[in-house]
Image (tube, rainbow, N blue to C red):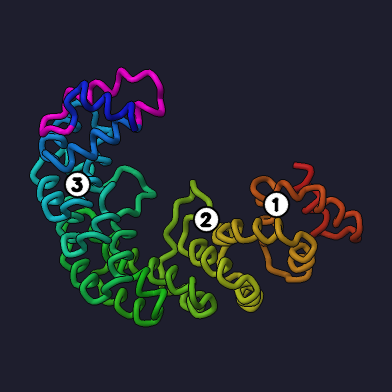
Amino acid sequence: MAEWEQFRAQHSAGGTDQGAAYGATKDVADAFRRRAFRSAVIAEWASTNPAAALAYLLEKDRGQAAQLMREWLRIDPEAAIDGVLAAGEKARGQLRILARDIARLAPSRLAEVVSAMPKSSNRWDTTAQDAFAIYAEKDPEAARAAAESVKGAMRSQALAGIARAWGETDGPAALAWAEKLSPGEERDMALKAGLIGWAKRDPVGALGRIDAVPPGGDEMYHASDAGAQVLREAAKHDWDATMKWLQDNPGKLGRTSLDGLQSALSQRLMSDVRGTLNSIASGNVPGLAMVLGNSLLNDGYPQHAAVWKWLEEHPSNSFTQGLRSSVVN
């Protein structure tokens, strides 16, 4: 702190124009102090002249603009949102970073902000969906009305966020609402998100409505279809009930969907290797042996010695032969 005060006095940090002080932080040799002093300059600048700070950072060090925006948002959410929206395309490109913060600090502005957001080039981006789910947890009715007012490329994500949060509290109602949306991406994303949210609380109920959701998914990416994502949440919440449903509904979900079980299976393998293997060996869920093999190639690998010991204690059959090959691989 003493070194910061000395730096601050030397470079006149604390005034309304702190560009020189910010530039001087780049010359601080120690990496820890360089980051700390830079953060301190940004925090002070956000409280004295945030608009000038934003313009400076967008021009000279865009990677730090999000930190300035967050500081400004904490101090004065309304002014921060107005300032970012008025700062041009460079600033609007940063809105995605702020969406979750806005959902918590200024939810009434979320629809306006999301409507101004450009579509992300990242296929896995769920920023707007996450932000509206946060809003819906606090005020479902207001969040739903806000999402329905969103325009532009992120509208489908906004509606999906409502469905996801609603699905966690009332799955049937969330799906009924989603089914009334405009056909196409809006309805498909909302149905999928609502079912995933439902699976977090009622796996069997959600799985029973799996046909309501278009399969979707990307063949290049495992566990990306609707069935896989619903299974992922269902298995995390209640593994035994999920396994029972799969046994009672053979062939209902394809091999790719079963990849959604891998994370939960790996966790069970790490905590109870014998119980997990006994359950899979006797459960007769087609395709689950392949998921187990993938687990052993990834997060479940630390248990390979325990799995091998289990194999030595059990007779040879199609399951144990396949599992042995997976361990060797």
Q: Residues within 10 Å of mark 3 (few under 14, many from 20)?
A: many
Task: Identify the residue shown where x is 23% and y is 52%.
Answer: 74
Q: Whole-Å distance between the Cαs marked 2 and 3? A: 39 Å
Q: Earlier in the sequence, mark 1 or mark 2?
A: 2
- Residue 160 visible, this angle: no
Would residue 159 be visible to someone looking at this image?
Answer: yes
Q: Secondary structure at mark 3?
A: helix
Q: Taking 223 as reference, is 87 above or below it?
A: above
> Is 155 colored magenta in this rendering?
no
- Report which residue position mark 3 lands on: 72
- Which sits earlier in the primary sequence, circle 2 or circle 3? 3
Q: Name which residue type carries label 2.
A: Ala
Residue nearest the observer in this picture, 170 or 246: 170
Stretch of the chain drawn in magenta: 14-35
- Residue bearing the label numbered 1: 293
Q: Position of residue 179 (x, y in %)?
A: 31, 76
Label whose residue precedes the other's in the sequence (3 or 1):
3
User: How many labels, in total?
Assistant: 3
Circle 2 residue: 223
